[in-house]
Amino acid sequence: MPERGPILLAMARSAIADAFGLGAADAQPVPAWAAEDGATFVTLTQGGNLRGCVGSLSAYRAIARDVRSNAVAAAFHDARFAPLGRHEIESTRIEVSLLSAITALPAGSEEDAKQALRPGSDGVVFQWRAYRSTFLPQVWEQLPEPAPFLQQLKRKAGLPADFWAPDVVLSRYSVVQWKEAP
């Protein structure tokens, strides 16, 4: 699977360049594996700081199309940031994460959830009624302990950090990720 990384990173960068009208004349053929359905996230950073992150939690379109769409969305439609400027392309680094299928994370209480989490490897989806958020496994680098990880995940969903309800639904997934060199 390592050979997929450079291809996916090039697809993401190409999609952003295309959005600025800077695309290359020759379109690269899509490998067979990239035509299969897959869920991806594209993360943009500048100087190590987040600049955009958008993705799909379920596999509903071809990996190549998902990466291209999420790259454009991360660059121009992440509500936390102003759209990427043409002058920022060179200083922006791209990371692509390919997600596994999502599985239930049984937890009757927040304490159960903290015990069940696998720091460093779990991507987590938090859902309670219409409130929903996710953190990629990479977020464990900034929030290495389960309690603050869950608190921030709840805040991202728009709920108080100390919120918990019996009908909270947690799910997990893993990723294979590739990053452009700094």
Image: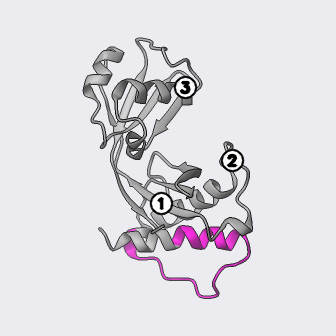
Q: Earlier in the sequence, mark 3 or mark 2?
A: 2
Q: Earlier in the sequence, mark 1 or mark 2?
A: 2
Query: In the rendered image of this protein, does residue 167 appear above or below residue 131?
Result: above
As drawn, the residue found furthest toward the top would be: 166
Q: Position of residue 5 (x, y in %)?
A: 39, 69
Task: Reply yes or no: does residue 14 show up in magenta.
Answer: yes
Task: Say which quarter of the image contains residue 169.
Answer: top left
Residue occupied by mark 3: 155
Residue occupied by mark 2: 81
Q: Position of residue 111 (x, y in %)?
A: 31, 16
Q: Position of residue 43 (x, y in %)?
A: 52, 55
Q: Is residue 14 left or right of residue 137?
A: right
Residue extent of the magenta highlight? 11-33
Q: Secondary structure at mark 3?
A: helix
Task: Reply yes or no: does residue 172 show up in magenta.
Answer: no
Residue occupied by mark 1: 95
Tell me the kind of residue under disc 2: Phe
Q: Is residue 53 left or right of residue 39?
A: right
Query: In the rendered image of this protein, does residue 124 appear above or below residue 4?
Result: above
Residue at 31% in and 29% down: 105
